[in-house]
């Protein structure tokens, strides 16, 4: 079988390259004795962008399947736990305006929709607290597990915050030493193509010619293979998502004992928002904004004001954001992953999870031969287009629901012409019935479940009409679930450790191996 796909070549390192290499190599490890290879070609001159330090819970299973020790990951990547995101000043801009998008599903989510019951109740508390324990856990600065909990398991669902500059070298070491990935440090000088448009080989300045059957583009914004070599255009979505620039800074803690928030904090500004991510040794803070609505000096003033006196003289790094994605992600024998595929503002930490999902799909549907690659590519493109579209919808939802009138940025975001058709239809539907599984959230490749929409909608004071006749059908089940959530919240709040305390214990003792 001369057309057998046996040699996978990944161009570009960083989080995208090494996660992709690890996911594919772990999945196909048994084939390596028969000649299957994974080669990663990385330029020694390209710095890591490191925009996204937030992840999704999917990374837990990804690392576990790669054979990574969670203890080693925490110790070497300056990692902390993430249990969701807190959105401040997004709805009205007031001091007390805040809500959570947690990582736990509402209580008994698969049995009963608690949203209409909460809407019909006289409960003055938040939707999150009524249906889920995680907001209270975050408010109290608690970790999602104890030191005795085995690796990758938790009392509450969790993801990670991490240092992207340390994560990529950590993955590189694991991939090369444990998973058999070949690492080549070299710059690609030319790309040789076949008559059918496929890439045959890469010429490099240090390693000569590198041949392959499937090439994965992880070259970041440059998009060396998918853009330059294959000519796939970029689809801009700045007409929907306005933020196009980020100013990033690393802020030290005031003391070694300072609490570490166990969630991402996103605080709305006049023309964008500020992220605040707590790592064990520092905070990663950045201002994402629309340059059409505020200039760099104004954006920096807002960021410095947020940082306070401790951030007055800290250096700030400017990062351009080009919201959008490739029109095609897999063309011929080239597939784009990471920034080469596209990028959206990091509002819901979608960058790393898109890498994971794409690499997992490639690994699971690895074409056996070139003859079937176009069929696999078509399925990959359909799934990936759907995922990008749903992420764009979900990010736009945060802006559409805002009631802020203090700047053109917020008013412009509510212009119906900037709202995707699917999202506009769903918002109309949700005026009359709360989101649930049947609202197109039943696909296996869904990125945000109905629960995520509920947390944002009712966290931002959206209201759905509730028919009392509908409530009567599952009233008993709903009341039981609400009671169970109150009991669960109380139990977790009394037995979970403080976040920093757990991280210290992980560094000293390690977690229980699986």
Image: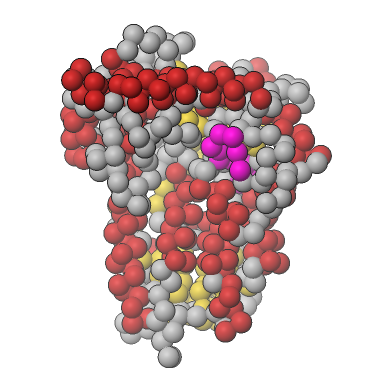
Range covered by the magenta-colored residues: 153-166
Question: Viewed as shown, does residue 187 lie left or right of 237?
Answer: right
**Which residue is depicted at the point 77% across and 40% down?**
507
Q: In the displayed image of the protein, which residue is found farthest to the front?
A: 476
Q: Residue at x 28, y 26 (%)?
A: 474
| Viewer-nearest residue: 407 or 440 | 440
The answer to which quarter of the image holds residue 396 is top left
Residue at the far right: name it.
Answer: 508
In this view, 71 is above or below 225:
above
> As drawn, is 7 to the left or to the right of 415?
right
Q: Quadrant of residue 332?
A: bottom left
Q: Quadrant of the N terminus?
A: bottom left
Image location (x, y in percent) of residue 238: 31, 41
State whether residue 435 appears in this view: yes
Between residues 402 and 43, which one lies in front from this camera angle?
Answer: 402
Please state which of residues 164 and 432 is positioned toward the viewer in this rendering: 432
Residue 109: within the magenta?
A: no
Indicate left or right for 476 with 170 as reference. Answer: left
Q: Nearer the viewer, residue 33 or 282?
A: 33
Q: Quadrant of residue 439?
A: top left
**How many marks can you see?**
0
- Horizontal and vertical percent position of residue 164: 61, 46
Q: Position of residue 485 (x, y in %)?
A: 47, 23
Q: Is residue 131 above or below residue 378?
A: above
Q: Is residue 340 visible?
A: no
| Residue 412 percent across, percent down from the top left | 26, 26
Q: Residue at x 49, y 19 (%)?
A: 486
Q: Residue at x 42, y 12 (%)?
A: 125
The residue most toward the bottom is 1
What scheme was used to colour the molecule? secondary structure
């Amino acid at each position: 079988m001369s057309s057998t796909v046996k040699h996978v070549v990944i161009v570009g390192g960083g989080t995208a390259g090494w996660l992709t290499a690890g996911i594919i190599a772990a999945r196909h490890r048994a084939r390596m004795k028969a000649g299957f290879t994974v080669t990663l070609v990385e330029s020694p001159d390209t710095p890591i962008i490191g925009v996204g330090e937030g992840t999704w819970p999917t990374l837990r299973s990804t690392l576990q399947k790669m054979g990574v020790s969670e203890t080693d990951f925490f110790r070497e990547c300056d990692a902390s736990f993430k249990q969701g995101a807190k959105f401040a000043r997004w709805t009205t801009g007031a001091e007390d305006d805040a809500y959570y998008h947690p990582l736990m599903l509402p209580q008994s989510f698969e049995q009963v929709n608690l949203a209409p019951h909460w809407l019909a109740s006289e409960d003055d508390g938040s939707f999150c607290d009524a249906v889920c324990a995680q907001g209270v856990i975050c408010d109290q600065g608690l970790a999602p597990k104890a030191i005795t909990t085995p690796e990758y398991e938790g009392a509450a669902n969790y993801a990670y915050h991490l240092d992207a500059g340390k994560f990529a070298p950590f993955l590189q070491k694991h991939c090369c030493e444990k998973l058999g990935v070949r690492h080549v440090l070299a710059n690609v000088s030319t790309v040789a193509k076949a008559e059918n448009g496929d890439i045959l080989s890469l010429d490099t300045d240090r390693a000569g010619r590198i041949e392959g059957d499937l090439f994965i583009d992880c070259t970041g914004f440059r998009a060396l293979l998918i853009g330059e070599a294959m000519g796939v255009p970029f689809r801009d979505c700045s007409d929907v998502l306005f933020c196009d620039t980020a100013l990033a800074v690393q802020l030290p803690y005031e003391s070694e004992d300072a609490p570490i928030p166990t969630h991402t904090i996103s605080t709305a500004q006049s023309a964008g928002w500020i992220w605040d991510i707590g790592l064990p040794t520092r905070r990663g803070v950045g201002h994402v904004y629309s340059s059409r609505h505020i200039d760099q000096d104004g954006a920096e003033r807002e960021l410095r004001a947020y940082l306070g006196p401790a951030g007055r003289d800290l250096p700030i790094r400017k990062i351009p954001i080009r919201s959008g994605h490739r029109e095609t992600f897999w063309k011929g024998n080239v597939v784009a992953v990471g920034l080469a595929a596209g990028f959206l503002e990091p509002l819901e930490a979608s960058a790393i999870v898109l890498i994971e999902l794409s690499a997992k799909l490639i690994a699971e549907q690895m074409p056996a031969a070139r003859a079937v690659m176009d069929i696999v590519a078509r399925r990959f493109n359909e799934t990936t287009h759907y995922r990008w579209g749903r992420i764009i919808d979900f990010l736009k939802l945060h802006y559409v629901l805002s009631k802020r009138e203090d700047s053109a940025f917020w008013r412009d975001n509510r212009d119906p012409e900037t709202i995707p058709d699917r999202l506009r239809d769903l918002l109309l539907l949700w005026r009359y019935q709360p989101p649930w599984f049947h609202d197109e959230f039943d696909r296996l490749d869904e990125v945000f479940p109905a629960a995520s929409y509920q947390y944002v909608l009712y966290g931002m004071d959206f209201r759905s009409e509730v028919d009392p006749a509908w409530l009567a059908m599952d009233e008993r089940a709903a009341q039981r679930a609400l009671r169970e959530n109150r009991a669960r919240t109380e139990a977790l709040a009394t037995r979970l450790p403080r976040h920093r305390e757990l991280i210290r214990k992980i560094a000293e003792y390690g977690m229980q191996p699986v």
